[in-house]
Image (cartoon, rainbow, N blue to C red):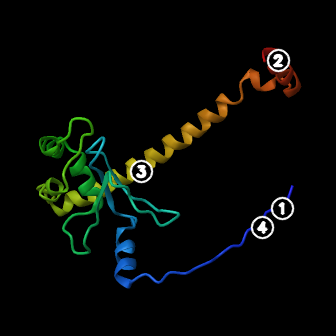
């Protein structure tokens, strides 16, 4: 038997700045609103902190608020989850095998601008919703830990190995 040898070739590519700028622009940022437009159109979320640079798939549309926007991400999230918006998106939906909403319909979606006092209420509701989501995640982790602590976990590994051999 002979030993194979491998030669590693490392190369660098110079990408045009326009390409790099486009890729950076496509990366999601905290505060972006993510809207599903394919498969199960209409689901929406606010991007929180990300560990790694992340680019959404083609099934999603990212809405990034301008600094001077009269709307906050939380207020937009609530609007996009509302029955009013759901009706508008359902009418714009297409596809029989895979439901989708064309990007033109998303861009043409009328947006209701709330009163400034409602913006703070939207922020408070989003904060409470995020806290509840974190609580649900923690409860789910606790439930998983509990399910692994059943009486079967007390069976010695040697006995389980023996039972597996007999069953084979």
Question: Closer to us: mark 2 or mark 4?
Answer: 4
The residue wearing badge 1 is: 3
Residue 133 is labelled as none
The structure residue drawn at horizontal position 85% and vertical position 59%, both measured from the top left corner, is 2
Label 2 to label 4, Cα distance in Å? 44 Å
The residue wearing badge 2 is: 163
The structure residue drawn at horizontal position 31% and vertical position 58%, both measured from the top left corner, is 33
Of labels 3 and 1, earlier in sequence is 1
Residue 145, x across and y down, in percent: 66, 35
Per the image, label 1 sits on a secondary structure element best described as: loop
The answer to the question of whether label 1 and label 4 lie on touching residues, with beta carbons closer than 8 A, is yes
Per the image, label 3 sits on a secondary structure element best described as: helix
Q: Is residue 8 left or right of residue 132?
A: right
Q: Is the residue 161 above or below the residue 68 in the image?
A: above
Q: Residue 1, located in which quarter of the rendered image?
A: bottom right
Question: Closer to us: mark 4 or mark 3?
Answer: 4
Label 1 to label 4, Cα distance in Å? 6 Å
Q: Nearer the viewer, residue 49 or 168?
A: 168
The structure residue drawn at horizontal position 45% and vertical position 49%, both measured from the top left corner, is 131
Q: Is the residue 106 above or below the residue 89 in the image?
A: below
Residue 14, x across and y down, in percent: 47, 84
The residue wearing badge 4 is: 5
Residue ranking furthest to the top:
166
The residue wearing badge 3 is: 130
């Amino acid at each position: 038997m002979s030993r194979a040898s491998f030669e590693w070739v490392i190369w660098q590519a110079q990408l045009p700045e326009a390409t790099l700028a486009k890729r950076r622009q496509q990366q999601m940022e905290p505060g972006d609103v993510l809207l599903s437009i394919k498969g199960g159109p209409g689901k929406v979320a606010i991007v929180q902190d990300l560990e790694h640079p992340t680019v959404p798939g083609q099934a999603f549309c990212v809405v990034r608020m301008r600094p001077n926007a009269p709307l906050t991400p939380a207020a937009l999230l609530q609007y996009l989850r509302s029955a009013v918006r759901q009706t508008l998106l359902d009418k714009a939906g297409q596809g029989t095998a895979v439901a989708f909403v064309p990007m033109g319909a998303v861009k043409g979606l009328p947006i209701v601008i709330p009163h400034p006092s409602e913006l703070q209420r939207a922020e408070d509701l989003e904060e409470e919703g995020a806290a509840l989501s974190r609580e649900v995640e923690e409860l789910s982790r606790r439930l998983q830990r509990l399910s692994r602590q059943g009486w079967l976990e007390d069976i010695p590994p040697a006995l389980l190995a023996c039972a597996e051999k007999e069953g084979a």
